[in-house]
Image (cartoon, rainbow, N blue to C red):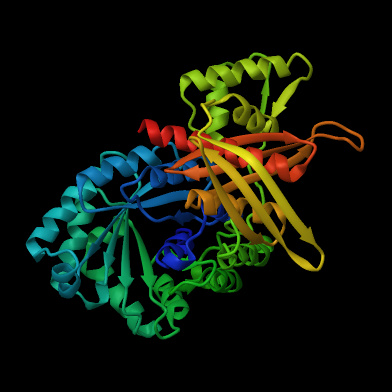
Amino acid sequence: MDSIRISDITMKQIAGRGEAALSFKGKLEIAKLLDRLGVSVIEVEGLAPSRSDALRVKSLATAVKDSVLAVPVELSTESVEATWDALKEAAHPRLQVMAPVSTVQMEYLSHKKPATMLETISEIVAACAARTADVEFLAEDATRADRDFLIQAIQCAVDAGATTVTICDAAGTMLGDEFAAFLGGLITDVPALADVCVGVAVANTTAMADACEVAALLAGAREAKACAAGGNTASLQNLAQIISARAELFGCPSPLHMVELRRIVGQIAWLCSTRRAKTSPFDDGVQDSVPELALSFGDGVSDVLKAAREIGYDLNSEDGHAVWEAIQDVLKHKERVGTRELDAIIASVALQVPPTYQVESYVINSGNNISAMAHLKINRAGEVLEGVALGDGPIDAAFLAIEQITHHHYELDDFQIRAVTEGHEAMGETVVRLLSGGKLYSGRGISMDIVGSSIQAYVNALNKIAYEEAEA
């Protein structure tokens, strides 16, 4: 019997809850954890018409090394092209075609008649198959579809090049035996399913998703969708443990690294439940996990640009050359330049712009018995703007005051502090990375006052955003 694949849909499920959306960095961290766990497929939400979604998929494509990275397309050839452009650098890319097959969803959600939907399925699956050998067709709401139409839709998808066909029970009201019988009947009635991987996805409406997917795997399915944390579907941990405990029934062991299962699922659950407080500029509790890079003498500008992309920067050739020259100066005194140093160099030399914002003054009050308070005055085009904010600490309060002045919250992708000199008058260096419009902007500040260097770094990054927005 073929091996079983477990496809994690945690990020898709979280994306459906707008009030609990994960940060850019949180998504990268979850993807890395799932990849380390040995999940067969990592599914993420598709592209909206924005640069940030394309950058998100490109960054995930770089971060995921062993798992398949699956991204859904909309039912248009334009969406296929845009999605593939963002996904194509992944080690194991998969395009997903999600199509409603029940009468209600076809007419009221997609506004298509059955004949038109069949043509659309064939066209979009074929467009995906022209770009990658791994194409998944998801028959949404399959358990409430007209059976003859469902069989035709599956046949159209397989004929057009789908290599995985997933049967979805959106209602989630079937019991395990019912769903197994439903799936077994489809496998019998559609001989073409013998040539593809059959997957299942069951909503947990009646708390039967785990049982239904296990029954489906025993009935011939080879891929099951699950969530590592929350979500209205089967539990990743439960499925993995059942397959591991009864491997003789499934004919294969669990595909996941069972020793790490509980720990990694716990980490993902924590990441999914840790959210940006309304009183904090920090988006979530994700700890820094940027890849460890090392640039050495002999690496060219192209190597620098590639390394920058791996930590999230999209540098143009001019900035790439400036960063490369700065690295060459550092390499006169040491053998390698690591990730942290590369980050600081990019903050120092890339996209240097005229200052839109300049710090006039700041006053910080903090103590063990009072909330930290920051009062900032910032000059913008000759006008002095003031912001006053309370925070969980002096830096937290200072960043909130800047947000108050600019009337904008930018996702704080990274925040680093380190000493650059020693002694009681040591200088501190801060690097701040802000995410705006799908691009990272870094700022650097140096001061004997850590709060001062943090404010400088934030404003430096803010100036780069303001410059590009004005040029656009």
Q: Is 346 positioned to the left or the right of 419 in the image? A: left
Residue closest to the far front: 383
Residue closest to the far right: 423
Q: Image quadrant of residue 349? A: top right
Q: Quadrant of the N terminus?
A: bottom left
Q: Image quadrant of residue 90? A: top left
Q: Residue at x 19, y 51 (%)?
A: 159
Q: Residue at x 71, y 39 (%)?
A: 453
Q: Residue at x 37, y 68 (%)?
A: 200
Foreground residue, 394 or 386? Answer: 386
Foreground residue, 406 or 142? Answer: 406
Residue 443 percent coordinates (x, y): 60, 35
Q: Is 378 positioned to the left or the right of 93 in the image? A: right
Count of number-bearing discs = 0
Residue 287 percent coordinates (x, y): 67, 52
Q: Is 118 positioned to the left or the right of 56 in the image? A: left
Q: Residue 31, can we see it?
A: no
Residue 465 percent coordinates (x, y): 48, 37
Q: Quadrant of the C terminus?
A: top left
Residue 391 percent coordinates (x, y): 66, 61
Q: Residue at x 53, y 63 (%)?
A: 252
Q: Residue 330, can we see it?
A: yes
Foreground residue, 403 or 410? Answer: 403
470 over 416 or under it: above or below: above
Q: Image quadrant of residue 393? A: bottom right
